[in-house]
Image (tube, rainbow, N blue to C red):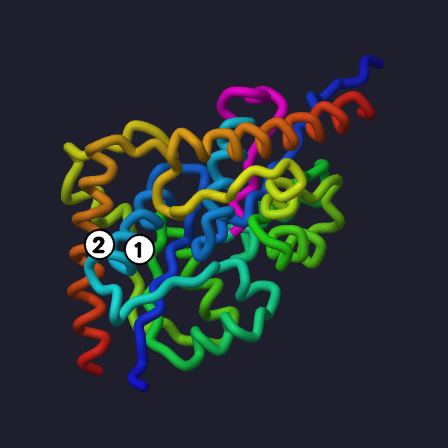
Amino acid sequence: MGKKVVVLPCSGIGKAYGEIGRQAVYDLAEDLKPEDVKTACLARLMIDDPETKAMVKDNFVITVDGCGMDCARKNVEAAGKQVDSSLRVVEAFKKHRDLKPQGVLELGEPGFKLAHILAERLSEEVDCVMKK
Amino acid sequence: MLEEIKPKKVGIIPCNGEEICEGSITRFASRKVLDKLRPNDTVTVCLPLFIAGGKEEREFAKNYPTITVDGCDKRCSQISTEKLSGRPYHSIVVSDLLKEHSIEPPKSRRALTDKDQAAVDLVADEITKKVDEILEKS
């Protein structure tokens, strides 16, 4: 069976960027690329969950971080896996400053639009990674 | 000499589990406590940052009481907190709590329905109860 792409958002809870990344990953894994993409609980890497560690080790990995702290990428690297690509929500936001999320978790229409734009960008990234 | 009285804060650490619907409940319930129920008494500790080496987060969890909120019995938030900073004051497992109260978990991890609000409220109330217990003791 061919490799899949595991896309892991940081899901930060302090700012809306974390929720946007999370929603973009669901959009990608459930609607845009359900055959190629799956996601997992990031925190399971910290408890050395064997299933999650194997999933990350045996597939391509893309991380989606809310901010420049790059927590998702760092967590994957701490588990011994080099990520194949990493994106930041804040970069997508810079290009679409008109799309302001309404709240941290209640994104509202503009926040969901931003999440969808990010999901499309991620979809392109998945194609690039799979061509490897 | 007058002693400075620092207000006691409680750290809420949800697991945010991306793979499971209960992970979304941990987020919404924690934010409800932070924003509406106990805004002056609680702060959130961002688990991914905490794990990635955030010094401030780890120091906070060492010096202040914490409540971990896990979606399932893998207890990632509780175990990570114990490893990095010390034992949380209280640990909540959403799947167990919902079962105990015969509330069905959400069907979607993406968006919560009005029906799922009962689960959010239950978990938020449980967190609040524990926050009050901690504050009363201190």
Residue under label 2 = A119
Is there a contact, CB below 8 Å, between mark 1 and mark 2?
yes
Crowding around mark 1 (Cα neighbors within 10 Å: few <14, some 14 to 19, many 20+) is many
* Furthest residue toward top: B2
- Relative to A106, is A87 above or below? below
User: Is A91 part of what is drawn in magenta?
Assistant: no
Query: Left or right: B45 with respect to A97?
Result: right
Crowding around mark 2 (Cα neighbors within 10 Å: few <14, some 14 to 19, many 20+) is many
Residue type, label 1? Val
Where's the C terminus of chain A, which quadrant?
A: bottom left
Residue at left 32%, top 86%?
A1
Indicate the position of residue B27 as horizontal and vertical percent values: 48, 40
Query: Left or right: B115 with respect to B100?
Result: left
Chain containing mark 2:
A
Residue type, label 2? Ala
Chain containing mark 1:
A
Q: Nearer the viewer, residue B15 or B1?
A: B15
Secondary element under disc 1, as helix, strand or loop, is helix
User: Is B42 part of what is drawn in magenta?
Assistant: yes
Task: Give the magenta-colored segment's residue range.
Answer: B34-47
* Furthest residue toward front: B102
Residue under label 1 = A25
Secondary element under disc 2, as helix, strand or loop, is helix
Which callout, 1 or 2, points at the residue further toward the start of the chain? 1
Q: Nearer the viewer, residue A77 or A105?
A: A105
